[in-house]
Image: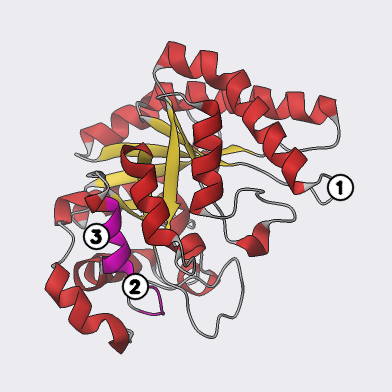
Amino acid sequence: MANPMWVERRSSMGSAPADKLCIHTATTRPLSIELGVDAYAAAGVAGITVWRDALSGRDPVAVGDRIRDAGLTPVSLCRGGFFVSPDAAARAVAVADNETAIREAAAIGVPMVVLVCGADPAVRLETARDQIVGGIEAVLPLAEELGVQLAIEPLHPMYADTRSAVNTMRSANDLTDRINHELVGVAVDVYHVWWDPQLEEQIERCGKRIFAFHVCDWRSPTRDLLTDRGLMGEGCIPIPQIRSWVEAAGFNGFNEVEVFSTEYWAQDQIGYIDRIVDAYGQHV
């Protein structure tokens, strides 16, 4: 059920355009990328974000061709990052893996790689952020060569121990300021940032450095902090309001549906895609 707090406000903002709807392959994880591409296209979805596990055993060039042949726009590749470690050799492995992700993105024909930047409980957060900057700077020459953007995604603070030392829009903006490169920007995921009292201010600060916008909902109470995301309208996130802020900041890209849900993965995925399209039209 839609959160009644936001129904009136949403109606005053208008619905998100259908030609901006993108779905992540992780949202429909049980489907192969081939079946996902066909099902998204049949449902009238406009774009697709490819998760790297969906590429396993496949030629990225052929995957990109199949996406475009189906009439979909390849939007981004998820995910790179995980630059943080107390071990220098592990950090070097992470840099090499991110270079592989950049090459995969270029082969598919997507404009960006989304970065979940990494954290390690053995590394202080300040040091972790320095390592993230170093890792991004290490892969920038290849990103420049291939014309691939790098989108830093701030994650909810509940993931600050092992997934990301970048936990607010402010921290993401601070890192992009430090790196100061036109190919480095931010991915705004409402699941991770909706709670932030500085969100509107920091979105405005980010401006045209917003490279991606991800939507889903926060169920209350949530049953799992990773795999119980809701479809838009099932929780407490004011999605249309946040969309209005990113658009006011200059973002005009896709609204990417990224839902990790064991409940929805267990259902018929074709019917689920229809529900996604409906929820998008009503609540984004």
**Reading the chain from its start, which is encountered first: label 3 or label 1?**
1
- Which residue, given by chain and number where applicable, does mark 2 sit on? 238
What amino acid does circle 2 point to? Pro
Q: Is residue 226 left or right of residue 266?
A: right
Check disc 1: other Cα within 10 Å, few if <14, some if 14-19, many if 20+. few
- Which of the colour schemes (rainbow, by chain, secondary structure, one colour) is used? secondary structure
- Which residue, given by chain and number where applicable, does mark 1 sit on? 122
The percent position of residue 65, horizontal first and vertical second, equals: 30, 27
Residue 244: mark? 3
Q: Nearer the viewer, residue 157 or 93?
A: 157
Distance between the alpha carbons at the discs numbered 3 and 2: 10 Å
Magenta highlight range = 234-246
Q: Nearer the viewer, residue 81 or 63?
A: 81
Residue 150 in the magenta stretch? The answer is no
The reply to whether residue 83 is visible in this rendering is no
Q: Residue at x 32, y 77 (%)?
A: 233
